[in-house]
Image (cartoon, grey):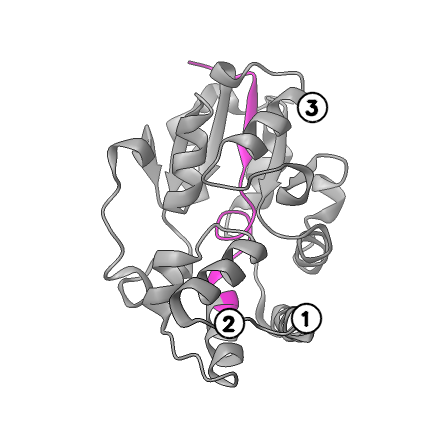
Amino acid sequence: MRPDLIIFDCDGVLIDSEIISARMLVAALAERGVQIDLNYVARHFLGRSYPVVMQTIRQDFGLDLPPEFEADYRERLLEGFRQGLTIMPGVRDVLERLALPWCVATSSSPRRAEMSLTLTGLWPLVEGRLFTASQVAHGKPAPDLFLHAAAAMGAEPTRALVIEDSLTGLQAARAAGMQVWRFTGGSHMSASLISDQPDEPPEATPHRRFASFAEFFQIAPDFRSNA
């Protein structure tokens, strides 16, 4: 099916940010006495919004982090992005040459999404077509964000294609009734970070997998503009 809309996740798909976020969170929580590793982050936090992260910490460790923790963590994260954030290879070429309407739907906060996309030079392309979890009642793995993005872009959910990396995002796309491809080329998808993640359950099974955006138009040549 040639979709009417392509919805890209941001972190771990357009930008190689997940490994930076994971390491920053591990370090910040360690200062508060919470010892977790990258595999814990991958299992519990990948693709989820900040409030869900805090809820999980509360449930698993019995710790209510103070309000200033969020602001401090976000500032550290943005500094980490300034120092080491990169765009996924081939992404700009795909976005600039798409013949189909597209948008971005992310669990990141609007500020973090805009800054990270600005640092990687993608903001001029994405501005005006960014949707975040702050706009819906329930973040991924609920389908709300993808359904909201499709409605705003004037597309039927069954005619939308989602590009995701996390199991949470895959599940959200499938729950929305959308086609979904899993991108596996981010640095966070290395064995060191996802070695003990569960396999894709039926409700999060993608329709296709690809490891490089250089393959994107090889997989779907009719998605590319000839202009």
Residue 176: give x, y in percent of width and height.
47, 25
Callout 2: 10 Å neighbours few (<14), some, many (20+)?
many
Magenta span of residues:
1-21
Of helix, strand and loop, which one carries label 2? helix
**Picture coordinates of residue 152, whole percent (x, y):** 69, 23
Which residue lies under the disc numbered 1? 67
* Amino acid on which disc 2 is placed: Leu
| CA separation in Å, label 1 and label 2 | 15 Å
What's the residue type where badge 3 is placed? Ala
Tell me the CA gap for discs 1 and 3. Answer: 33 Å
Of residues 58 and 101, the one nearer the viewer is 58
| Residue 112, x across and y down, in percent | 68, 57
Number of numbered discs visible in the structure rendering: 3
Residue position marked by numbered label 3 in the rendering: 152
Residue lying at the far front in this picture: please name it.
62
> Residue 25: which disc?
2
Position of the C terminus, as image quadrant, is: top right
Does the segment drawn in magenta span residue 15? yes
Q: In percent of the image, x 60 and y 16: which residue is there? A: 155
Q: Residue at x 32, y 66 (%)?
A: 39
